[in-house]
Amino acid sequence: MSTFGPQIEVAIARVRADVAKLHGELVRAGLVVWTGGNVSGRVPGAELFVIKPSGVAYDELAPENMILCDLGGEVVAGTPGSERASSSDTAAHAHVYRHMPEVGGVVHTHSTYATAWAARGEEIPCVLTAMADEFGGPIPVGPFAIIGDDSIGRGIVETLAGHRSRAVLMQNHGPFTIGVTPKDAVKAAVMVEDVARTVHLARAQGEPIPIPQASIDALYERYQNVYGQTGDARRPEAGRDPASTA
Ligand SMILES: O=C(CO)[C@@H](O)[C@@H](O)COP(=O)(O)O
């Protein structure tokens, strides 16, 4: 029997499939070891999101064992996958969805270089055009926060609200990224690791050259509005189907 209306059930099924598949991208991009990372996706048109079960191997993840949660972070009882414990970061993801309505996907990893910056509690300075494009400036550091409740979520929201960056380095923990879709948040997770690595290597050889703010602004503006194709999810004129998670 359907718990929700038919349209919402279709949306849930899409998000389950997307979120299960996107964990494979974390592995493919070398962002995770063992089970150390998670992806979630908001269900368009509902106060719900989908996240993975805690500590389950990535190659066992499938749409039917993804876990449906409400925006309070509670597992929706009786839905597929609900017999297992959801990700340790469920409360953090839920907090982001509650407080950032524009966010459709959240990702967390312990990717090596980004986490090394987080361990030092140092923001990544904007010294690459790719950073200006994707993040519009430096990658900020969020507070140290205990895993399990909404402390991490509060740190993410406090740090990213009003910031161009879609990535935050939670101190002593690792990167959390947000996106308009789960795929967009995964892209940010891939990109933050890439720039963390490059800036680390640059600094090992000397002092990187800062990019003037006016150039950062111009690069960011172009990347948001001109780069890629008109239908891309992040392009303002994309006119995205609100039911789409792609
Ligand atoms: O950082 C932590 C826990 O230390 C988690 O984000 C990571 O291990 C992934 O946990 P889950 O398998 O999503 O519960």
Image: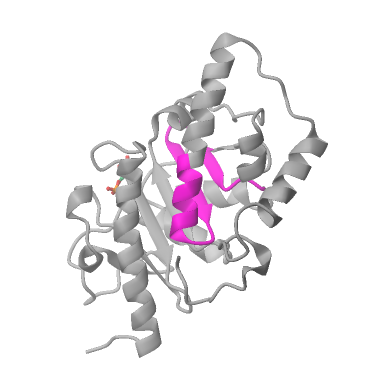
**57 vs 5: above or below:** above
Give the side of residue 166 with respect to residue 36, left or right. right
Identify which residue is drawn at 53% across, 21% down: 200
Residue reaching furthest to the front: 229
Q: Position of residue 115 (x, y in %)?
A: 44, 31
Give the side of residue 193 with respect to residue 136, left or right. left
Identify which residue is drawn at 35% across, 89% down: 6
Identify which residue is drawn at 17% across, 66% down: 83
Can residue 164 be seen here? The reply is yes
- The coloring applied to the image is one colour
**229 vs 1: above or below:** above
Task: Please identify the quarter of the rendering in which residue 49 is found.
Answer: bottom left
**16 vs 221: above or below:** below
Q: Position of residue 52 (x, y in %)?
A: 29, 57
- What are the residue bounds of the magenta stretch? 164-190
| Image quadrant containing the N terminus | bottom left
Residue reaching furthest to the top: 205
Q: Position of residue 173 (x, y in %)?
A: 42, 35
Q: How many marks?
A: 0
| Image quadrant containing the C terminus | bottom left
**88 vs 128: above or below:** below
Identify which residue is drawn at 39% across, 77% down: 11
Quadrant in which ligand 1 is drawn: top left
Does the stretch in magenta take in 13? no
Q: Position of residue 175 (x, y in %)?
A: 47, 39
Q: Nearer the viewer, residue 24 or 125?
A: 24
Does the stretch in magenta take in 165? yes
Give the side of residue 137 with respect to residue 213, left or right. left
Can residue 151 be seen here? The reply is no
